Amino acid sequence: MTLTLRLGLLRSGLELRQFFRGRESVIFSFALPILLLIVFGSVFGGDDVAPGVTLTQYFVPGMIAAAQLTNGFQTLAVQIPMERDRGVLKRLYGAPMPAGAYFIGKVAMVYLIGVGGCAIMLAIATAFFDVTLPATGGQWLTLLWVSLLGIAACTLCGIAFSSIPREAKRAPAVVTPVALVLQFISGVFFVFTDLPAWMQQIAAVFPLKWMAQGMRSVFLPDAFAANEPAGTWELGRVAIMLGAWVIVGLALCLLTFRWTGREDS
């Protein structure tokens, strides 16, 4: 176990280098959420969604959650099929390296990119859009556990979803619409309670809605909780739903992950 962990952490450095060498992954997974924050913040900065809460302040927590979804789910669901088609996974599976080290490297990469992206977005939001950083230890703790559970759920789902595209070149066309739809129905680009009730119910099945709600509890005033569907932040339910998706994602990974393409099976 110690060897697997050590090799996995070493591999995370390789994964990071490969990620930042890929222009597409840097643009769509890392830079795009930051650019969207700047654009939406500049366009809607003066509009209020509630007394003392601007649309930009509402938008920032959702964008942080969406960035975590992008880094975990979208990046891996596209990246892994490419590695599978190039035969990288087949070679790794036949190598002496424990298989678990590969997944540890991927997870560590996603977490490191997530931390870096979140820090940049918070710096921009506080400097230009009047977003206030968490003021209490409890808020920072909530930010931490929502991020840890949310990224874990998205990462595991991304690994599991990577088995769906039949060819690597089709992966972006399969994965991107799923990520975009989740963002539109989960309160990222719009105030969640302004969405149709049926759309809210669908979003509540998936983790992004709960990630965004948990993030709002950190960055918005406590009084804004009255504007949530249940009238409270429901942090206990946020933890339960994200924890459930971690379990579901892990089970799907174990059941569906393939080291080789379908033609090699």
Image (cartoon, rainbow, N blue to C red):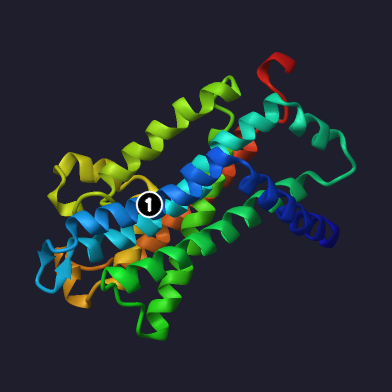
Q: Nearer the viewer, residue 210 or 251?
A: 210
SS of the residue under disc 1 = helix
Mark 1 neighbour density, 10 Å: few (under 14) some (14–19) many (20 or more): some
* Left or right: 57 in relation to 183: left
Q: Nearer the viewer, residue 189 or 152?
A: 189
Task: Name the quadrant of the C terminus.
Answer: top right
Residue drawn at 63 percent across, 35 percent down: 80
Q: Position of residue 153 (x, y in %)?
A: 50, 51
Q: Quadrant of residue 220?
A: bottom left
Q: Position of residue 187 (x, y in %)?
A: 25, 51
Q: As shown in the figure, which amino acid type bears the numbered disc 1?
A: Leu
Above-or-below relation of 91 to 121: above
Above-or-below relation of 152 to 175: below
Q: Position of residue 205 (x, y in %)?
A: 34, 45
* Residue 60 in sight from this viewpoint: yes
Above-or-below relation of 134 to 16: below
* Left or right: 122 in relation to 219: right
* Residue 218 in sight from this viewpoint: no
Q: Which residue is mark 1?
A: 35
Q: Position of residue 242 (x, y in %)?
A: 43, 56
* Left or right: 250 in relation to 228: right
Q: Spot the residue most to the bottom.
A: 136
Task: Name the quadrant of the N terminus.
Answer: bottom right
Residue drawn at 69 percent across, 32 percent down: 83
Q: Nearer the viewer, residue 11 or 3?
A: 11
Residue drawn at 76 percent across, 50 percent down: 101
